[in-house]
Amino acid sequence: MTEVIGAYDKIRRIDTGIFSMNQALRNDVTDETGFPIRTITEIFGNPGLGKSSLSYYLAGEITKQVKPDGSIALLDLEGLDSEHLPKAISTGGFSGKIQIVEAIDNKGKPKSHESMLDEWIDMLDTPESVCGIVDSIGAISPISERESGIEEGFGAKRAVAVSRFVRKLMATIRESPDPKVALLTNHVHVAIGGVGHTTTGGVQLGFAAATRIYIYNSSKDAIKQGDTVLSNVLVGRLEKLRYGGKGREFKFVISPGRGVRPNLCAVQDCVDLGIATRGAVVKIGETSFGRIGEIFQRDVDGDRDFFKPFHSALRQYETTK
């Protein structure tokens, strides 16, 4: 019989609040579902699809469950909407602190991206911090790049900077006595030759990330009222999942200005699994819940009790499948 000598912390998994995402992240070895802690996750896709909103939501959910009084460390390299941020992070119930790496130092001078990344890691490496977001690692502009001429090549310089950052981040997460999660959003590009896609930052990031999620739009599932889109339905495809199933997909619902909507996600998951039907009205069995626009308004109004049948149906489905 094989004997394992020595202890290693088991990777804990957190309920994301999105049924299909929990299932997509299933560990094929242990059969556990949910988001893995003590890991790096890369979330990438085209601009404007909700990468930031998904990372905000996940950071709030993870921190709320791991350490209710914990904080989130945020570095935004592309421009931060300070009004949208707290709404998107708190949509699942998070009410803690968000620490932001500021772009200007105490002397009024712009900080280098390298120093901001170091500062972010220091923020993450504190007892109160649980989850960190870098949005977007693809926007990093190394000092050497900014000081070089436009005609000079700089792709390798960016990859080197990202590689060094990722190695330091890996060590921080591995050596921390407290559970940490890093969520890194990234740009996606068409691969050379026009087949497939790739992300900014070189191979080191792809190696370090335990999970890589590609985001794309599912326009046919959008929640509309007439021609007006009330919420967008996005698809996340797992392009890497350590100890899991590469290629699995999940859906999540984002409302403009409101972020990820877990209750509407539950409705979408019920429809996708055949638990509910979505025609003129949404039904579970013979029970009608009204038109999709009316259901959207229930979510806006914060009517949590209205959505309990959808969440209950998903829990029952999980126990009987």
Image (cartoon, rainbow, N blue to C red):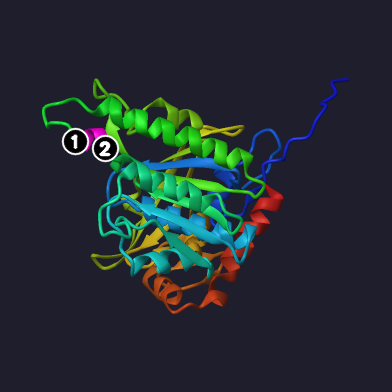
Q: Secondary structure at mark 1?
A: helix
- Could you say where residue 46 lies in the image, as x and y percent from the top left? 29, 43
How many marks do you count on the picture?
Answer: 2
Q: Locate the N terminus and report the quarter of the image it occupies.
A: top right
Magenta highlight range:
142-147
Picture layout, residue 297 above or below residue 144: below
- Residue 172 visible, this orientation: yes
- Residue 275 visible, this orientation: no
Residue drawn at the location 37% of the way across and 45% of the way down: 115
Using the numbered discs, state the Cα–Cα distance from disc 1 to disc 2 in whole angstroms: 6 Å
The residue wearing badge 2 is: 143
Picture layout, residue 63 above or below residue 122: below
- Could you say where residue 250 lies in the image, as x and y percent from the top left? 48, 46
Residue 43 left/right relative to 314: left
The kind of residue on which mark 2 rests is Ile
Residue 105 found in image quarter? bottom left
Question: Looking at this view, is 225 or 97 the one in front?
Answer: 97
The residue wearing badge 1 is: 147
The kind of residue on which mark 1 rests is Glu
Crowding at label 1, few (<14), some or many (≥20) Cα neighbours within 10 Å? Answer: few
Q: Secondary structure at mark 2?
A: helix
Residue drawn at the location 68% of the way across and 43% of the way down: 32
- Could you say where residue 257 lies in the image, as x and y percent from the top left? 33, 67
Question: Looking at this view, is 313 or 261 the one in front?
Answer: 261
